[in-house]
Amino acid sequence: MDKDSAMDNPKYTVERKTSPKKKKKVTFPGPIETPEPEPTKPSTSTPVRKLKKKRQEDDDEGEIMKPKKLKTSLKESSTSMGQQDKASPDDGQNKNVERQPVSRKKKQKNKHINQEPIESSESEPSQPSTNTPVKTLKRKRQEDKEEEETIESKKMKTPPKDSSSCDAKQIATSSELTERDDLITDKDKFEAKYVEEYYFASGGYGSIFSGFRKSDNLPVAVKHIFKRKITNKKMDDGNGKMVPSEVAIMLKLQDESIHSDGKAAPVALLDWYEIGGEILLVMERPIPCEDLRHYTDSEGGTLQEEEAKIIMTQLIRTAIDLEDRNIFHQDIKTDNILIQTHTNTPQARLIDFGVSCMAEKDSILRGFSGTPINAPPEAFRGFCSPGSTTVWQLGVVLYETLHYCNDFSTLHFLEGDQMIDDELSEECQDFFQACLDTSVEQRPNLQDLLHHPWLR
């Protein structure tokens, strides 16, 4: 069958006419073939603008709960867009007419707000909002109220201003005093308390100057000792501090029982300082006084036995006190005994503990540190004992006060060049014989010497 006959066939013609389904499908989208724009029909779905408006309202409500810093102009533009949407009819043509006069700039802003509200708030600079949210104001008032209550409670607990300021001043003052004490040297302390005057004596370890204490004008003797000449070891002062032995021993002699009447009490140590290469000992200086050597010379070169008895008794009692404390003076001689002359009865004082040491009375010491010229005979053999050495030295002191010989020499005495004066009383001569016995075993101890008939 050819083409023309097929088209004239009634069978095919009837099929095209009787298919309503295909006609409906072809005619329904008919506006696509028309060149004119298809009029917008109302859709059953929610308009896009209403969705945008709803999102904007949700954003505005979120800003009330948690306000974001957006430009006021952006808010106003979004509000004006919402009002235009409400006023515009549902007709699509009217909507297009109303959208035409909107400026390009405003469209961009609205589009920006509708599509990316969060990014715009972060990218653009924040400005303070003129409308403070109600919840924020309430929270702020609550915080202010709590802060006021906290301040009032602190005021009730804190002490008055004056007391706190006084405590602060006291703490500052104490810290300043501590810093000042650390900066003050021993020289500053000495000069602040004492005045050193003139030189009046010297020894093997230093020099002695007179002076006085500023606070009460108490006369003092300032003894300068060179550190390099101190041969004896340091000792504990009783408080755990190591000090020169002379200082430690004099600190032990501050007992009141030693300074009672009838004794040749050691001069008291008042203070001591380390200044440069020297140690300064500040001691009391009895006035008027002079050493026993010069005192004997002033009395005509010798003393009366009665006066010598008084001085010797005082010296023996003090030597016993030292022996009880295991203190060995080692250098008892006329130069180290002061005589106070302010009364009719002479008062002896023992000084110069520069070579003293700690030792028991019956111990044996190697060597002898006292004055060599009047050392005991055993010292020449290389040893000595504190008790017997002290007895010998007391005999030497008595010999120099009752004889016209100022310098006793052990060697001369042993050789017979120096002898005991036979014009003295028998008790006195016996006393000499006891003290100056060349045998250590035959020499009496201090207690026996104190009860000798000559001293009764």
Image (cartoon, rainbow, N blue to C red):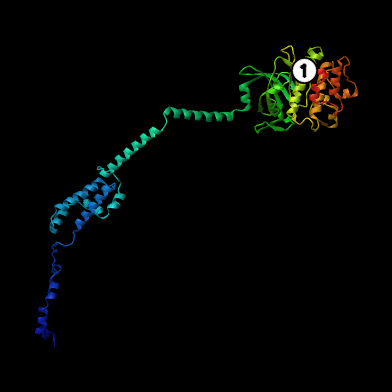
Q: Picture coordinates of residue 427 (x, y %)? A: 85, 17
User: Which of 408 and 47 lies nearest the eye of the viewer?
Assistant: 408
Q: At 61% from the left edge and 22% from the top edge, which residue is drawn?
A: 192
Total numbered labels placed on residues in the image:
1
Is residue 162 visible in the rendered image? The answer is yes
Quadrant assignment, res 325: top right
Q: Residue at x 90, y 24 (%)?
A: 415
Point out the stretch of residues depicted in magenta.
310-314
Q: Does 311 appear in magenta?
A: yes
- Is residue 325 positioned above or below 200 on the image? below
Q: Position of residue 209 (x, y in %)?
A: 70, 20
Position of residue 214 in the picture relative to residue 175 (left or right):
right
- Can residue 133 be seen in this snapshot? no
Task: Tell me which corner region of the image, top left, top right, bottom left or bottom right, holds residue 135.
Answer: top left
Taking 255 as reference, is 340 above or below it?
A: above
Helix, strand or loop under label 1: helix
Q: Which of 405 and 33 is in front in this view?
A: 405
Q: In this view, does 306 lie to the left or right of 64?
A: right
Badge 1: few (under 14), some or many (20 or more) residues near its Cα, within 10 Å? Answer: many
On-image quarter of the N terminus: bottom left
Q: Which amino acid does label 1 sit on?
A: Ile
Query: x and y percent of residue 211 in the render?
Result: 67, 18
Extreme residue in the bottom direction: 1
- How far across and down, in percent of the image, does residue 49 sit? 19, 56
- The quarter of the picture where the C terminus appears is top right
Q: Name the residue beneath numbered marker 1.
A: 311
Chief SS of the magenta region: helix
Q: Is residue 376 shown in magenta?
A: no
Which of the 4 image quadrants contains residue 14?
bottom left
Q: Image check: 278 left or right of 304?
A: left
Task: Say left or right for 260 vs 91.
Answer: right
